[in-house]
Each structure stands twice: as structure tokens, then as C-alpha cells.
Image (cartoon, grey):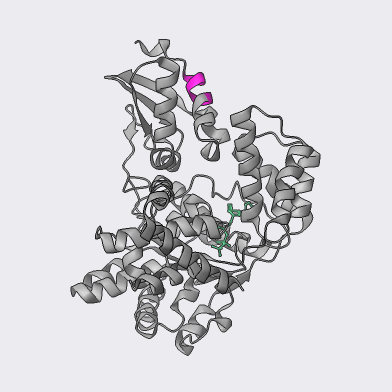
Amino acid sequence: MPQNAVDFSSIIDAARKADPANARGWYEQLELVSFEGGTLKVMCPTTAIANFLSSNCTHAFTAAAQTVTGHLLGVEFVCDDFEEDSPQQYQPQQNTANHDIPYTLHPDLTFDNFVVGQSNRLAHASCVAISNSLGVTYNPLFIHSNAGLGKTHLLHAICTNVASNTQNLKIRFLTCEAFVSKFVEAIENGDLLKFQETFRNVDMLILDDVQFLSDRESSQDEFFHTFNALHSQRKQIVLSADRPPSEIPSLDERLLSRFKWGLVARIDKPSYETRLAIVKKKARVRGIEIPEDVASAIASKITSNIREIEGAITTLGAIAYTDNAEIDISLCNDILGCKEVEPQSVLSFADVIEAVVKYFKVKQSDLKGKSRQKSIVRPRQITMYLARHKTKMSLEEIGYKIGGRDHSTVMHSIDKIAKLSREDKLLKQQIKDLDNLLDVAKG
Ligand SMILES: Nc1ncnc2c1ncn2[C@@H]1O[C@H](COP(=O)(O)OP(=O)(O)OP(=O)(O)O)[C@@H](O)[C@H]1O
């Protein structure tokens, strides 16, 4: 089949329908570059987009390509960050070949896609400032807020901005949990020197959720030395937490004072106007048209957590793509109406993982690690299943929290547990016990 015989726009439409939750407005910017040896090569505008598609959408695009052409085809996402003649194939370990950023950056979480209002103006401005001159303005930068108000979004945006404006920088971006578990692993394996080299020789260190250091004395001590090593070389440090430094329990005084050396910026709950702008922005990113009355209904009803706004838009988009339904106020009220009668989940990922750890007597670090032992794999899959059903987290967020796994691994684990628990009595009982434990935790 020649390349020009492939109806690429129908493939894009079919891919949107096959997986509406991941459909994006920027699908329009994808181009078919070649069709050779049974593989469609799709050119992506950025590495982050190629990364996102490879991790999350390969299945949907392959199924779409096969449905539209009637042939067994493969799909490969490529990008051309170096502006060379031939496109660079996407390398899963790297965000760009010129930077060492081991963590996968999300293409949606950019400064362009971040709505600025009174509630987050300082945090946003300081992130922009540091990403334009690392280690010079605010060091460290400490951002804190309640859940779902944009901390992680800003951290991704800093990395994306730095990666696109500078060359050959070493950036480490990870959750504090990952830092602690790598530290513990390094002690266990006698690799402490290598660990220290990894974290003390970077141009920027970004740690998400540093409240996790609470009560972990050795990790605090190690981080204290990492901090000093970086700060003395004027390397940039960015930290985020769900509370200000002074409210992190059992935080060493030496760290507490260092966390306040630079700038501490709080993100507050956004106003109605900011929420409305966020609804519109999110809809645009997902390529969904939302009428004004629907946008304002969402912004009025969902007030405290932007993640829930995103959830409502994803649901509307899924219905619009799969049923070809028009998004109108009655559809919106159906969705938001359901939300109202749902009991408000106060469970977090931490509640879920703690329950699983206690119940199966396993270590958190193992659940988030790479072990393939059955005694770890099953509790890990159950954690993902429960996180999906008992919290409001997206597949991507669950993957991020459980050791940086991708969305398709999370989906596979959830499906597997759902299927097995129908037949396997022991598994069914385990889920029921954990369900009860979590209901008690919720109170
Ligand atoms: N000002 C904003 N503009 C656009 N999107 C936003 C904004 N604030 C938050 N969001 C979106 O809300 C969702 C949740 O944000 P994010 O994950 O950054 O929250 P968080 O503060 O890190 O939460 P948590 O503490 O639970 O990890 C993301 O999809 C993010 O893009």
C-alpha cells in the first residue's frame, strides 16, 4: 500500500474514538512521514508528545490504523528535535537527546497550558523566572498547596522550558518517595557513592512531595548533604509539598531553615474566573468544544481540586467522541449531577498503599520498585486497582505514584485484577477486606 493511499485523518479520528481519554487537540499536528515494511511512521512535533503517544496511545493508533486500512500494521512515533534531515526515532529513556532528564515529561503540563490567576501568580512567576536563569534567582524554590492545584504541573513546565531553551543540562526530577527509595536501595546494595554522585552532580534537582521526608531521619540527613552540595555550586533546587516547610512534621531544623532560604510560594484555591479559564484551556488541549454555559457550570460546581475539573472534561470528551454526542448543558448536568450524589472520596494514594502494605506485609519500596516476584506483583496490581476505584486519580497519576509506571501498565493491572477477582475466591476476599479497611480509614 503506498503512503498516499493511507487515509491518515481517518486513522486519527478512529484513534480518538478508540481511546478518548487520551485524545488531544494536538493530534491534528501529527503527520504521516512514511509507510514502509508494514509500519506507519508518525512525526510528532515534540519529544514529549512522541513519548506520551508511545507510552499511552500505541494500542489505540495500531487498532485505528488496522481498522481504517484493513491491513495488519504497526505504528511508530518519531520526532525531529534536532532539525536534521532524517527524523530521530523516539528513545524511551530520554526526553531529548541533549538532556539528561530521566523522568518522563508530560506534553500537556507546560507554561502555555497553565492558567495564571491571583491564586497561583507568585508560584507561576517564580517557576518561569528560575527556568530562565537556573540557580540565580530563587534557590531553593519551594511551592506548596493542597492537592490538585498545579504544583506538579509547574514542575513539569520548568523542565520542559529548560530543556527547550538550553543544551546539555543534567536535570533530575523525581518524587521525594523515589529519592528515599533509591537512597534505601543504594544503602542495601552498597552503592551509596554512586547515589551521591547521581544527585550531587546535576544542574537542577526537582523533588515533588517533600513532605515525604517527615520522620525519615537518614533520608533527611542524606538530602541535607545533597542540598548543600548543589546549593554551594549554585545549582537549582526546586521542591514541592502539600504544606509549607514549617508544617512538615519532624523536619530537621537545618533542613527547615534551608527550605526557607529562597522563595516559598503558596498556591491557593482558584477563583471562579480562573477555574473557568482552566476549563476552557483543558477542553482546547483535548480538542473538545465546550459551550459557554457548560464551561461555567463545571467551573461553578467544582471548586477545590482542578484534577476533578479535568475528570469532568475527560468524561464529556469520552462521551462526545464515542457516541458522537453533542456536549450540552443537559449532558453536563448528568455528569456533574452524578458527582454530587457520589460520596466525597477523602482517600488518597497514600491511604491505599498503606492499607496494601499492612495487609500483605510488604514494603512500599518494593511495590514501587521493579521486583517481578509474585508476592510483590499481585499487591502492586491490587494497589493500582484500588487507587483507581477508591480515589479520583487518573491512570497517569497512579502510574506516576507507583514508581513512574506508564498509563498502559496501570490499565493492564486494573483489568487483570478486575477479571481475576471474578473467578479467584481468595483474591475476591482480599479486595473485599481492603475495601473495608479503606472504608474505615475514610470514616
Ligand atoms: N492553573 C492551572 N492551569 C491549568 N491546569 C491546572 C492548573 N492548576 C492545576 N491544573 C491541572 O490540575 C491537575 C492537577 O494538578 P497537579 O497534578 O499539578 O496538582 P498537584 O498540586 O501536584 O497535586 P498533588 O499534591 O495531589 O500531587 C493537572 O491536570 C493540572 O494540569
Q: Quadrant of the N terminus?
A: top left
Image side of residue 294 versus residue 227, left or right? right
Image side of residue 330 versus residue 429, left or right? right
Q: What is the tally of numbered marks visible in this picture? A: 0
Farthest residue toward the bottom? 253
Q: Residue at x 26, y 19 (%)?
A: 37
- Residue 246 placed where, x, y %? 57, 83
Q: Quadrant of the C terminus?
A: bottom right
Image side of residue 320 versus residue 399, left or right? right
Mark yes or no: residue 213 visible. yes
Q: Magenta segment: does it hold 293?
A: no
- Residue 238 placed where, x, y %? 48, 67
Q: Residue at x 54, y 50 (%)?
A: 109
**How would you classify the magenta stretch by its main secondary structure?**
helix
Closer to the camera in the image, 294 or 176: 294
- Residue 106 placed where, x, y %? 48, 48
Farthest residue toward the right? 293
Q: Residue at x 25, y 57 (%)?
A: 372
Closer to the camera in the image, 41 or 435: 435
The segment highlighted magenta reads 8-13
Q: Residue at x 42, y 70 (%)?
A: 234
Answer with the quadrant where ligand 1 appears in the image. bottom right
Whether 276 is drawn above or below 350: the answer is above
Mark yes or no: residue 403 visible. no
- Residue 374 placed where, x, y %? 26, 59
